[in-house]
Amino acid sequence: MTSSHLWLPYSQMQTVPAPQMVTRTEGVRIYLADGRCLIDGTSSWWTACHGYNHPHIAAAVAAQLEQLPHVMLGGLVHKPVLDLSRRLAGLLPGDLDYVFFSESGSVSVEIALKMAVQFWINQGVQARSRFLSFQHAYHGDTFAAMSVCDPDKGMHRLLSGVLAQQLVVKLPRGAAEFTEFEQVVAKHAAELAAVIIEPLVQAAAGMKFHQPEVLAKITEIAARYDLLVIFDEITTGFGRTGTMFACEQAGVVPDIMTLSKALTGGTVPLAATIARRHVYESFLSDSIDQALVHGPTFCGNPMGCAAANASLDLFESEPRLEQVAAIEAGFEAGLAPCRGLAQVRDVRVKGAIGVVQLDRVPDLDALRQRFLEAGVWVRPFADVIYLMPPLVIGAEELDTLIQAVNRVVKDWSALPS
Ligand SMILES: Cc1ncc(COP(=O)(O)O)c(C=O)c1O
């Protein structure tokens, strides 16, 4: 990369190709300084659910900036944060009613883990301080979040030796695996605070899907052994899997949920950790010692809350879930040609997520370059090419993305392996 003081995320700075210079965004389009325009197949790490620069969100953030850009949440509150917590509580299933705000997904996971451990400590149980998580999980880049990621294949594997050692198991699917899973849970229950899972879609570690029945059964077994259940809906939340929240498809309610990414429609950073009533009430006492002693500086930032409130308005007034269903149908039909290719291991679709898994890890830089040349912003990782476009994408633009994937995969498949 040419001289720069910028240290890029997830990049080997010695070899990373020069990033594209972006000058503006609009709808599902990213405009580059050299005049090119790309159709976005990633929603900028799965955030921009309403497309970029949605005028309703932009106006809400601009008005908030003018009136009250930020104020500490210690001793002070404001309407956007009160409105947003009430609206989220109303939207989320069951008694997921108590909303704690932070500024990034990883931090919301840290808070969820801390909440779970302290839930037990507040009841005089010190021993339940470990977590059960799953192979192929990804929950973020901070230390506790890294500890519940896949320790062997995940992107933090180099640090496994210094992370807290959690119980990371195979995600059970069939009857025999569930028997084994339950045995492991039974054996370790006394030391486990909670199980944490990305419901229905394990995203950043390989775009792997599981059935709602699997999620329901994991939840049921965890409850049988008194483990708290944490659903990390940072990626799946806000319509991506076909329902507003993935847990709805399994008909289960976690004890704690994390949200971020599409929470603000992808405009400004905001995250939330939401607790059910019994979790919240376990923190109530006369003593500060039993309180959740946590408070990010930008906790409940008014501009973030204004953006999130505006984003929720759009979910109410525009047909996002119908759009997701249309994208799903488009992926099912459009990606079918990839299914027949020998070098393609799997093609799978869930809501507005379309995945082509290759039989090996390709030259990612070369593939990304091919997508750029095709006029689309698609960023394969590991052995996976995926599309997660803004939910507002039109049929023609969706087809452009799908055909680009078909072409690039077909050409790649023709190369000698
Ligand atoms: C399921 C899940 N949890 C947590 C995170 C971390 O969120 P952030 O990047 O905002 O820290 C991600 C990010 O991709 C995610 O997909």
Image: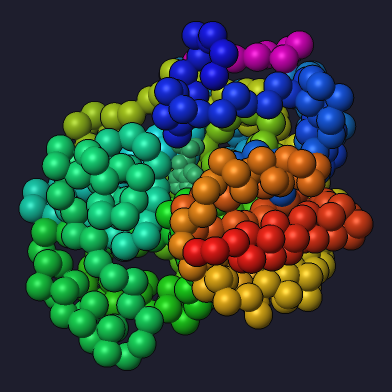
Q: Is residue 124 magenta?
A: no
Residue shown at the point (46%, 27%) measured from the top left = 15
Residue positioned 46% across, 62% down in the render: 360
Which quadrant does the N terminus fall into?
top right
> Looking at the rendering, which quadrant does residue 285 occupy?
top left
Picture coordinates of residue 197, whole percent (x, y): 39, 60
- Residue 369, relative to residue 224: is it above or below? above
What secondary structure characterizes most of the magenta part?
A: loop
Q: How many marks?
A: 0
Q: Quadrant of residue 13?
A: top left
Q: Is residue 187 left or right of residue 49?
A: left
**71 part of magenta stretch:** yes
- Relative depth, front residue between 318 and 324: 324
Q: Which residues are magenta?
A: 65-74
342 or 121: nearer the eye? 342
> In this image, 347 relative to 57: left or right?
left
Q: In the figure, 230 relative to 6: above or below?
A: below
Nearest to the observer: residue 148 or residue 78: 148
Q: For the point 12% across and 67% down, which residue is it?
A: 188
Instruction: Tell which of 26 and 125 is nearer to you.
Output: 26
Asked if one can make out residue 201 in the rendered structure from this viewpoint, the answer is: no
Q: Residue furthest bottom?
A: 175
**36 with respect to 217 (left or right):** right
Q: Does residue 152 appear left or right of residue 215 in this picture?
A: left
List x then y, in percent, for residue 139.
39, 48
